[in-house]
Amino acid sequence: MADMYQLPSASLDLLFAAISADGRRILAPTDQDGRSELQPVTSPAQVAKDYLQTALSAKEVVFPKVEQLLSYTLAPGQVDLVDATPRAEPTVVFGIRPCEASGFQALDAVFNWDYRDTFFNARMDQLTVIGMSCTRKDDACFCTSVGGGPGCAKGSDILLTPTADGYLAEVLTDKGRAIQALAPEAFKPAAGVDKAALLADVPAAFDQPALTAKLPALFDGPLWADQSLRCVGCGACAFVCPTCVCFDIQEEADAKAGRRIRAWDSCGYHMFTLHASGHNPRETQGQRWRQRIYHKFSYYPERYRSLGCVGCGKCTRACPVDMNLKEHLVEASQVNS
Amino acid sequence: MELREKAKQLLESGAVKAVLGFEAGTGGIRRPAFAKDAARADRLGFDGEQNLASYVTRKEVKRLGKVAVAAKPAVLRALLQLMAEHQLKEEEVLPLVLDASGQVQELASAQAIEEHLALEAQVIPAEDRALMDRLGKMTRQERWDFWQKELSRCIKCYACRSSCPMCYCGHCTMDCNRPQWVPVPSHALGNLEYHMVRAMHLAGRCVECGDCGRACPVGIPIHLLTFNAEESVHAQFGQRAGASAKLDYAMSTFRPDDKETFIR
């Protein structure tokens, strides 16, 4: 059970100042010409006033879009290899939504599956998440259908829920307590706050365990090709997704030196599974769309006993042709198998 | 005749295999929709933003057979340009337009499209025009700084490329990896090279629909690069992409009477 406190609005300044003084970077949703973006801030005044979510997800904090893994120099008969050091700085991510906060666990499932990823873990170790419960939602949201909720604490070290004059603060982990200890005076005793009454109402849209159970039977059905007919095959959904973890390894080198880089990749791309032989096991967009759904709702549960989707709806909002994930999952749920 | 009625008629008679239009999407927005049967045609409308011509060259759509497309001027320009570039045959697509009285009209030939388009002025939206003018007045350094800042947000999701009706290449330069021509990662060089190549490749071919900018999930006004290249070709060669189904492309057409002497 989490420790519950009240955090008056005015105390946020104190908290931000204490976090900054402790040498930690604070990343928070900011308003950039009307776009919501995670940016470094030092005071609560810089945080966006009215945001549902940022367009990109907070995954880039621990899994950046481009990351150098190693570099080398070549000379006749000699290769000098230098491992890159992860650029991990003490960071507090403030104000991300519960869906996104829980997304880190889906990344962790892959990055610590068989091999422990040095870069991801170095950044995770330095990361503290102060989540912000949702008091509103939009038509893309479906957290409650995938085990989350507008006030879900999973993945947050501290979870704030907006109240009339500040926040209800749940201090959930040791990392959260370490932040609290930086400005203990900011956290006042909480008295009789009904958290549930403060949250957005997000009714469940489909029965996820039932969907997961039926997906294997739908594999060869016509649904995926039909759904994906309007998909244009870009990678916007995967790149904004807080749980999409696929990456490409690129070698940028000349005759004398080179570096190895990890960059985001997407299963929606036609070259994602293209073999050197020219054969492509996922030749059509329908097969690629099916992979996206199955990876999140069938293979993740099978392999990690968890889901590869947090229901944030970022993919839906980012999609140039409105490939609404919730709607497509509801449709799959309703197919008679 | 209204679009839904026309779509049903075309589908039931077998004249087309699918009708492309728009339907209601998330939170009341409009999105592209394919009607392969009369029932689905009941949701179709003309009102939507995306350039539906980007679909007609897709493998999955070509496999359907002939498609009818609810077409706005930018779609028609794209269709003509695709025909000019031998990516689409006249008989593979049936553009549907609204005439002055609000009735749906079939444009059954390239000539019919050309004639219809001749009645439509090609206008760059005021907001885009204002930003282009602002960029035009900047010094070279200021303009460089502007694009450096904008492109730093690029995540190379290729939503711009995928949404573009003229980006139909089955094997884009960005995907040429034996060897890799343009860096894949979305670092500064990878982003810059990608967008430079794309803008140059669309000079004289951009139909100015603005779909690349509309598609960008991080709000980069990337369409202004291709708009600018297109306007530049128009200013220097008097050509407009998508005016005709006959190829007359300034950037790759040789004419013995070219006013420049270096080429002779």
Image (cartoon, coloured by chain):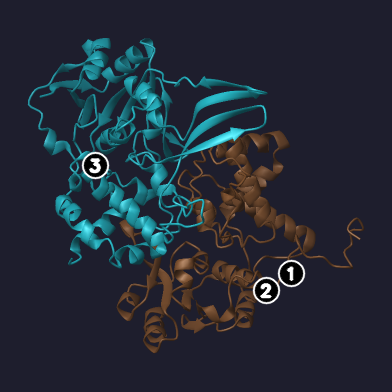
- Dividing the picture into quadrants, the one containing residue B206 is bottom right
Q: Colour of chain B?
A: brown
- What separation in Å lies between label 1 and label 3 (alpha carbons)? 56 Å
Examine the rendered structure and indicate whether residue B10 appears above or below residue A5: below
Is residue B46 among the parts visible in the rendering? Answer: yes
Quick one: which chain is cyan?
A: A
**Mark number displayed over residue A303:** 3
- Labels 1, 2: front one: 1
Q: Quadrant of the N terminus of chain B?
A: bottom left
> Disc 1 marks which amino acid?
Asp
Q: Give the farthest residue toward the bottom.
A: B13
- What separation in Å lies between label 2 and label 3 (alpha carbons)? 55 Å
Q: Write down the residue under mark 1.
A: B248
Judging from the image, mark 3 belongs to the subunit labelled: A
Secondary element at tag 3: helix
> Disc 2 marks which amino acid?
Ser
Judge if badges 1 and 2 mark residues of a common chain: yes
Q: Residue at x 19, y 52 (%)?
A: A212
Examine the rendered structure and indicate whether residue A167 appears above or below residue A289: above
Q: Quadrant of the C terminus of chain B?
A: bottom right
Q: Give the farthest residue toward the front.
A: A77
Residue B250: % across, % down: 76, 62
Residue closer to the observer: A183 or A3:
A3
Is residue A323 among the parts visible in the rendering? Answer: no
Residue count near mark 2 (Cα–Cα under 10 Å), binned few <14, some 14–19, many ≥20: many
Q: Write down the residue under mark 2.
A: B244
**Mark number displayed over residue A43:** none
